[in-house]
Amino acid sequence: MRGAVTLSCGLLGGFLAFSPAFSPAQSFEKHVAVSQEVNASMAGRDAMRQGGNAIDAAVATAFALAVTHPAAGNIGGGGFIVAYITESREIVTVDFREKAPAASEPRMYLDAKGRLLPHHRAGARAAGVPGTVRGLGLAHAKYGRLPWKQLVTPAAELARDGFTITETLAHSLNDQLFSKRKLEAGGRDDLGSNPDRLSDFPESMAAYAKPDHTRWKAGDRLIQPDLAATLDRIAVEGPDEFYKGKTAKILADYSKQHGGLITLDDLAAYQAELRAPIHSTYRGYDIYGMGPVASGGIVLAQMLNILETFDLKSDGHQSARTLHRVTEAMRRGFYTRATEVADPAYVTVPVEKLISKEYARELASTISDRATPSEQLASFRIVPAEGNDTTHLSTMDGSGNAVALTYTLEEGYGSKAVVAGAGFLLNNEMGDFNLIPGRTDVTGRIGTTPNLIAPNKRMLSSQTPTLVLKEGKVRVVTGSPGGRTIPNTVLWVVLNLLEFELSPREAVDGARTHHAWFPDVLTLEGSSWPEQVRQELSALGHRVRSVAIQGDAHTIVVDPANGRRIGVPDHRRVTSAAAGD
């Protein structure tokens, strides 16, 4: 039975005491899909109503988001799936991260003097070879139940018939279509005027501007006929259509005409990969995440292993001592990310060492009662400074299958370039490589060797789709957008549930923090952190800053007392929704 209910019950082993004082999450008896947009969540729910499983629901939701959430939902980007398959009782992961085109080279975004050019951020040259359609296709072929066409057609219908846009989407589109860029003096390169918005690309204007070129407002209808035609082809012909059919030719022609590097050969050669999951434990719970080239699974496991050596609960959820230790775990986890993790086809990643309890104890022993200067962790020189938009969805069906899926175009609206005649946005994921070899600076620019550009290489990712199991059953499905903040957002959701025993709603709503090794700054989300705690952290040597929001962790929590699926949309994005039965 669908509906929001207030729960007031304790769960097994003290896990999650629900607070009726908080706005309730939505509780479902059978299945649930949680995403950033209601039409997409309903597409996932409908797939399960029709006899599909959580994989089918994730595929349907992801394709729908490519229509209704253009800033991040996509068929022109890439991402990762972490799933629990009930029939085989196994965790499976799918890597559909984008790849560098075959013509790529390490210094392709630098001028003759080694200065970074702007076309790593916008336009066809910023794009890696997309992986989304191939990844969803692989997951469906291995584990889905419903016919492929049945899962893609709802998205095609949303694009063809249109959907009513929200105030949030109207504001986002207007910002891209009407805001004026401020170009720096002399800020031109060989590609033109440093494009950085949809309004800089005629094809993007044709796809997203209103016919009368007035501003969008809530209640307007967005219709995308070119995208509908592309989705129809993919629905009928399968994933190969995107990589070897008409859509592939349209994409390759567009790339060639606009200075990009993606070719028909690149598209035809692209394959998604089944990877071994990252498995760690925390307080008796099993934590499963995505392995390299995603860094999130390793970083999250390492941070949790470090923090398990401390009694955070006794110190207090919002105490300066707790935040200090969490920050130091983040600092070390992100140093590991910068120096050890990259595409495993190009770099040997010592996964077992990095996620081991023994190594975590070594790292924990280096945490003192003062902030560790980030430069002290590095064995190489950190140089002075020179003068992200993703989306996550979670699904779970009545049989216990569960999917955490995170995918992205990188920045909001990716490269800002819609492929003419195909209607979808290209990613700008090439910027996730280390673009200036050898230069790691205090601003957070990383130039370490493992993640340098190479032909056909997958760029490092921070995405952290995560499953938490207890006694072989899924208890939590979560993940988040947010660039480098993603592992730390997921860390806080997991800590809030497992360490501090907050309710699902409280765990997702709770304020978050972020530290990424460099810049050596601790950011505190929102205004709920007590001023005394801020002062104490500063006294410990942390440089403290504030940010408005961090992440968007659409989460499912299972109540082991009755098996109900509790869908918890993150209220940081007002358009988010859970749909189920």
Image (cartoon, rainbow, N blue to C red):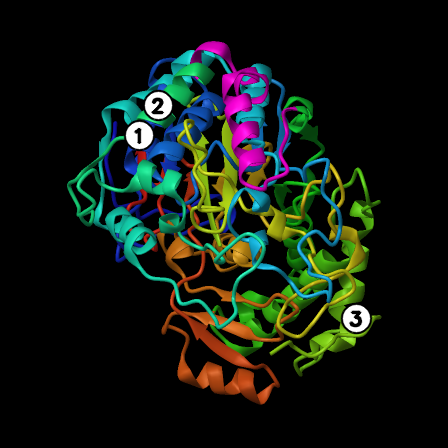
Relative vertical location of residue 25 with respect to residue 267 in this rendering, above or below: below
* Most foreground residue, 31 or 92: 92
Give the magenta range: 235-264
Task: State yes or no: residue 256 in magenta.
Answer: yes
Residue at position x 78%, y 54% in the image? 340
Q: Position of residue 179 (x, y in %)?
A: 31, 59
Query: Can you say which quadrant of the picture contains the C terminus?
Result: top left
The three-letter code of the residue at mark 2 reads Ala
Q: Residue furthest left?
A: 219
| SS label for mark 2 | helix
Q: Residues within 10 Å of mark 2 (few under 14, many from 20)?
A: many
* Residue hosting label 2: 228
Camera sees residue 207: yes
Which numbered disc, 2 or 3, marks the residue closer to the eye?
2
* Residue hosting label 3: 378
Task: State yes or no: residue 131 in magenta.
Answer: no
Q: Position of residue 9 (x, y in %)?
A: 35, 46
Residue contact between numbered discs 1 and 2, judged by CB atoms under 8 Å: yes
* Most foreground residue, 466 or 502: 466
User: For the stretch drawn in magenta, what is the main secondary structure?
Assistant: helix
| SS label for mark 1 | loop
Q: What numbered label is drawn on residue 224?
A: 1
State the separation of the CA atoms marked 1 and 2. Answer: 6 Å
The three-letter code of the residue at mark 3 reads Ala
* Most foreground residue, 470 or 509: 509
State the separation of the CA atoms marked 1 and 3. Answer: 49 Å
